Each structure stands twice: as C-alpha cells, then as structure tokens.
Image (tube, coloured by chain):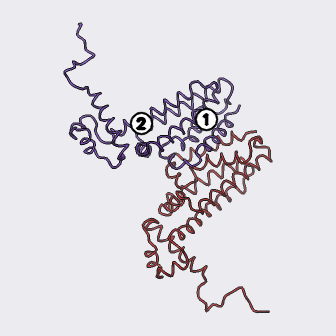
Chain colours: A purple, B red
Amino acid sequence: MNTPITSAPPSRGPSEHEVRAQIVEAATEYFSRYGYEKTTVSDLAKEIGFSKAYIYKFFDSKQAIGEVICANRLAAIITTVNDAVEDAHSATEKFRRMFKALLASGSQLFFQDRKLYDIAAVAAASPWPSVRGYEERIRQLVSEIVLLGRETGEFERKTPLDEAANAIFLVMKPYFNPLLLQYNLDGAEEAALQLAGLVLRSLAP
Amino acid sequence: MNTPITSAPPSRGPSEHEVRAQIVEAATEYFSRYGYEKTTVSDLAKEIGFSKAYIYKFFDSKQAIGEVICANRLAAIITTVNDAVEDAHSATEKFRRMFKALLASGSQLFFQDRKLYDIAAVAAASPWPSVRGYEERIRQLVSEIVLLGRETGEFERKTPLDEAANAIFLVMKPYFNPLLLQYNLDGAEEAALQLAGLVLRSLAP
C-alpha cells in the first residue's frame, strides 16, 4: 500500500510530457524561422533528430503541433490581458485596459514574430479549437467586466447581459482576431481608443 | 454663329465615351467569368476583337479598367443604401437601414458575383481610389445621420461629431469593406443587428 504511484522511475527516460514539450519547443523555433505553411513534419523530424514516425507517436499531424504553439501564444495574450485588467479600479478602466492590451499583444505578435503570427492567422481562419477557446475567454472577460460595471452602477442594466457582451466582443474582434487584425493595423491604436469610447457611451446608465 | 457644337457628326464613329463603356462592359463580363487576377489585357482584347494597343489608348492598365468596374459596383451599393435610408422617418431608423443595406449589398456581391467581389477585395486591400471614395461616402452618410439625430433630439450631443461618426464607421467597417466582409459573413446579419443596437445605445441622449 505504500508503493509510490505518481512518479516513474528515472531509468524510463523522458516522459511523454517532456518529449511533447521538446517537439513543441523545436517546432516553435523552426516555424518562427521558416514559417508554418512551408514546414513539413519531415523537416521538423530532421531538425530535432527524431524519426518522423516517432513524432507521429506524440502528434497526429503538423496542425496538432501548430495547435499547441498557437494555444501557448494565445494563453500568453490572455495572461497579459488579465494582468492589465486586474488592478484597474473600475469596470470602465478594466474595459479600456482589456482592449488596449489585446491590441498591443496582437500587434506585437504580428510585428515581432511574423511567422508565428501566420500560424495564428491560419488558426483563426479555420478556426482551430485554440482560437475558439481564446475568443470564448475574451467574451467571458467582457461579460465579467460588464457585470461588474452593472454592480458598481457604472453601466446601464436594461440590455440583456449576453447581448451587450456579445456586441462589445464583435466591436473588438477586428483588433484581437489574428486573421482580421492584419487588415486593421493602420491607425489601430486610434481606432481602438475611439471604439472604446463608443462602447463606454453605449454602456452609460 | 449657328453651327451646332454639342453633337459630333455620326460619321466620326463611336465616341471615346462609347468605346470606354464598351471595354468596361466586356471586361465586367469577362472578369466575372474568369476572375480579375487571371485575366490579362491581351485576353480582354481578344474577347472584344480590339487590338491590345487600342485598349491601351483608353485605359492605362488592367487596374484602370478594374477601377471603373469597381467604382460602378460601389456606386450601385451607395445608391441602394441611399434609397433604403431616404424614406426612413427618424435618424435611428435611417441608421438601422443603412447598416442593413450595406451588409445586404456586400453579401449579395459576394454570393452572387463572386469573381467581381474578388475585384472589390483586391481594390480594398490596396486600397484603390474607388474604395477610398466609397468609404468616404459612407463616413459622410453616418455623419449626416448622426447630425440629423442630434437635431431631432434622438441622439446625444456631447461627443464631438467627427469622433462619434468615425467610431460608428469603424464598427460597421468589417461589414461593408469587401476585404473584411468575407471573413465576417458567418452570422453577419445577427452581428449587424447587435452592433446597430450597441451603436444606438452609444448615441442615446
């Protein structure tokens, strides 16, 4: 009854989790240099020094690897947004910061890591589950902020919460969805400011 | 002093205006069948039975022909929108109708004349002057509706007019800009309704 069951003996070699992480790390590096579309699983296998068959033991396809990379990036954006929103003192301020942080994170990915941005754009076009999850998280955050503003009396309470939150989500979408953002980068900061103003006027009690 | 100067003698052959119209008509037909990107001026010349050099006497490039086709289509959309707005009895109703008509016209072009839609998408990516003019006209129409609503007391008057109008223009842009619309067609009608509601709440006095 005292047998430890949680950790495998070290002699078993790297865990599945470790191998997956290693593949994802190498793929992130490789995709960000050569692009997602142009890379094959064979290219990756050669780069890491694994056989193609070995990689397929851990991931069903190139897209499955891309999914994890994309999910990691989007999770990092959500963390940035949460951090930006957390210590704001009003729902109004939380909303402004959320919009600003979403645009800033997306633009940064676009301008500083263009080839990884391309994975996100492919992901948003399908859309992949990681993008659906990302968008769902943003919709939820909007909903939480609207609800908070209703509780503090900053925002009106007549519009059904789901409708108000979804409409705000739609206003912001061209600035956080990677597929759309690339077409909206010109003057995006000014646009986001004006749109945040419009949204806040729409929420006035 | 009695010499008529307004009409050319019939023996002079078709006027420049007529030849241009003939080229545009044939090109519209040809592009809508084979696509704008894949067609060359040589293809067009062969189809119409003109020499390539003769076409170049009237248009500097394929894009110059595409510009006229695009401008014609966008002008038709603006006419549809103006008609939809004209007999509405309030600024609120005018705004709702404008948004609805813009989305309907754009979707119709996308679904019924996909290859011509592609010209509009190319035009919006650059953007061509025809698209700039189209967007300017929409911005102006928004401005006129907001101003009317301020005069009738339907809308608030605190926000600077340009800022209010531009923010509304930005909210609608994913639904009237051909480059963006193709990514926003899923659930676009419901989205446009919800966004119109949000915009109208933002305009409440």
Residue appearing at x 59%, y 38% in the figure: A168
Picture layout, residue A71 above or below residue B26: above
Comparing B162 with A13, the one in front is: A13
Residue B46: x and y in percent read 43, 79
Tell me how far mark 1 sits from mark 2, CA to CA: 24 Å
Q: Which residue is mark 2?
A: A130
Q: Secondary structure at mark 2?
A: helix
Q: Hey, what amino acid is under mark 1?
A: Ala
Q: Chain of mark 1?
A: A
Q: Which residue is mark 1?
A: A164
Q: Secondary structure at mark 1?
A: helix
Residue appearing at x 58%, y 41% in the figure: A171
Q: Which mark is residue A54?
A: none
Comparing B168 with A81, the one in front is: A81
Q: Hey, what amino acid is under mark 2?
A: Ser
Q: Residues within 10 Å of mark 1 (few under 14, many from 20)?
A: many
Q: Is residue B38 left or right of residue A83?
A: left
Mark 1 and mark 2 lie on one chain; the one further toward the N terminus is 2
